[in-house]
Amino acid sequence: MAQDDYSNDGTVDIKGNPADKKKTGNWKACRYILGNECCERLAYYGMSTNLVNYLEDRLNQGNVAASNNVTNWSGTCYITPLIGAFLADSYLGRYWTIASFVVIYIIGMTLLTLSASVPGLKPSCDKDSCHPTTGQTAAFFVALYFIALGTGGIKPCVSSFGADQFDETDETEKKKKSSFFNWFYLSINIGALIASSVLVWIQMNVGWGWGFGIPAVAMALAVVFFFLGSKLYRIQKPGGSPITRIIQVIVASFRKYQVQVPDDKSLLYETAEEESQIQGSRKLEHTNKFKFFDKAAVETRADNIKGLTNPWRLCTVTQVEELKSIIRLLPIWASGIVFATVYSQMSTMFVLQGNTMDQKMGPRFKIPSASLSLFDTLSVIFWAPVYDRIIVPYARKFTGHERGFTQLQRMGIGLVISIVSMIVAGVLEVVRLKFVRENNYYDLEYIPMTIFWQVPQYFLIGCAEVFTFIGQLEFFYDQAPDAMRSLCSALSLTTVALGNYLSTLLVTVVTKVTTRGGKLGWIPDNLNRGHLDYFYWLLAILSFLNFTVYLWISKWYTYKKAT
């Protein structure tokens, strides 16, 4: 068989043989990955979208406690990917990491279903309220954090695993990779659409046992989808611990802090072979930023002992550039945290705001406030293909860039749209509170103002996601060193974690400051007597400041160059 029939990026098939381009990878493998992601996200959003209402209704938590518990758990779901990513890049590879962590995920989903349906595990309720015991509450949170750990092995690997199915050295396949991230995010939102509409309605009208049981079944289907495609997958071999390689560069640089870096950078140490010393990684070209770390690649007489090099004293240019790539990514990573804070409002403040409004659709049907997140999902489902098929070709005519916009430009557009979404949410709350004051509706559970006034803020966040979150997925995969792609995908996901934690911090601080002197504060249990609009203005101001810093960072950034 000709050399061109095999992938040139170091991937292998499930049996460990070089990946045959005709038999593995490409869209024929991705359909199983996309099916897996759709079902897994249906399971995740099916139990998380309406979680704030479960905590309030069944576990008797107030607005602030329920909101903080949701954002803390959501944050953990985006921190645990660091564990899965480390295992994937270092030892197991992406395929076997996903295969291992789905077991933990299913255990968590099963326990969650049991905690909401089995007598003794589910809280006892009367007409007025529920009465959870400490054990029942503990069982529920154990299930939640099992899910958080399980999803930690899947989130950082599955998007990178899908992108691995396209050979970067093949120009035809490389073009398809950019489209993959759009369709990957679309599959996420198809699952989320079903979750935020059908499953939320089932939870509020049929029961939480069914409402959590169906997501558990969806997770089982996700596992089936994943394993069905095993023979078609291209698998990237793990390259050893990226943390160790990073520390080696730092140690070697400080050991040689007095060594002068030569002006001719071709004199820096690199292997003579075509391939990098790091398994599954191409060589990286030298860049001029962070020159201090170049010292780690300067050869001295003490570096070669009996013809062997000590990686704690002498590192290759590629290894040094791995560390530089991570450092360059960090400011871009940090700029995503405030965006993630805005995004997290959909599962907390937007839901609580919707809880005060008229949720009727016709004389009989009542839409749960959490179900309005389906308009965010519909927005993504609308904008993802529009971006891929219409905006990119149109923008390409003006920018000359093959992707229409650079990845940094794409993310920046999303940050601007997120600012607008907070302004729209704040304006709605100002109008809502004015309506309450004018009609003395302070103690009315549902004011006669339709919940569908919330649709624009959900739709704008969905549009922002298509630009920022998908751009972020592609950017962190593309700019990551080859052997650190799972870790960098996990790094991008931690912005969501820190965004949730920042939301928790802001809510806690705002509540503490604004309730001094016996005042109700901005976010009381009765929002008709609060000022949620002030909280939205705060987020809009933080988002604007974040965007200003992002513009400066984007001008500074240097894109990775692989040889």
Image (cartoon, rainbow, N blue to C red):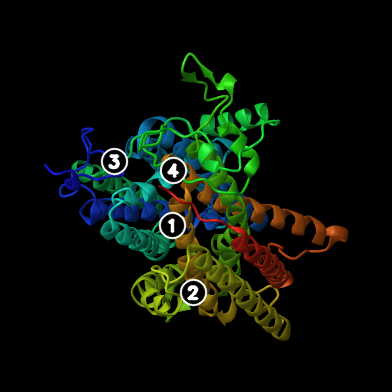
The reply to whether dot 2 and dot 1 touch (C-beta < 8 Å) is: no
Quadrant of the rendered structure where residue 519 is? Answer: bottom right
Could you tell me which residue is drawn at 49 percent across and 52 percent down? 560
Q: Amino acid at mark 1?
A: Glu
Residue 184: numbered disc: none
Could you tell me which residue is drawn at 48 percent across and 13 percent down? 306
Lower position in the chain sequence, tag 1 or tag 3? 3
Distance in Å between CA atoms under marks 2 and 3 = 39 Å
Residue hosting label 1: 474
Distance in Å between CA atoms under marks 4 and 1 = 12 Å
Q: Is residue 223 left or right of residue 529?
A: left
Could you tell me which residue is drawn at 39 percent across and 42 percent down? 282
Residue 11: numbered disc: 3
Q: Secondary structure at mark 4?
A: helix
Distance in Å between CA atoms under marks 4 and 3 = 15 Å
Lower position in the chain sequence, tag 2 or tag 3? 3
Q: Secondary structure at mark 1?
A: helix
Nearest to viewer (mark 4 / mark 3): 3
Q: Amino acid at mark 2?
A: Phe
Distance in Å between CA atoms under marks 2 and 1 = 22 Å
Residue 459: numbered disc: 2
Residue hosting label 4: 486
Does residue 488 sit above or below 42 in this rendering? above
Q: Secondary structure at mark 2?
A: helix
Does residue 367 sit above or below 96 in this rendering? below
Lower position in the chain sequence, tag 2 or tag 1? 2
Nearest to viewer (mark 1 / mark 3): 3
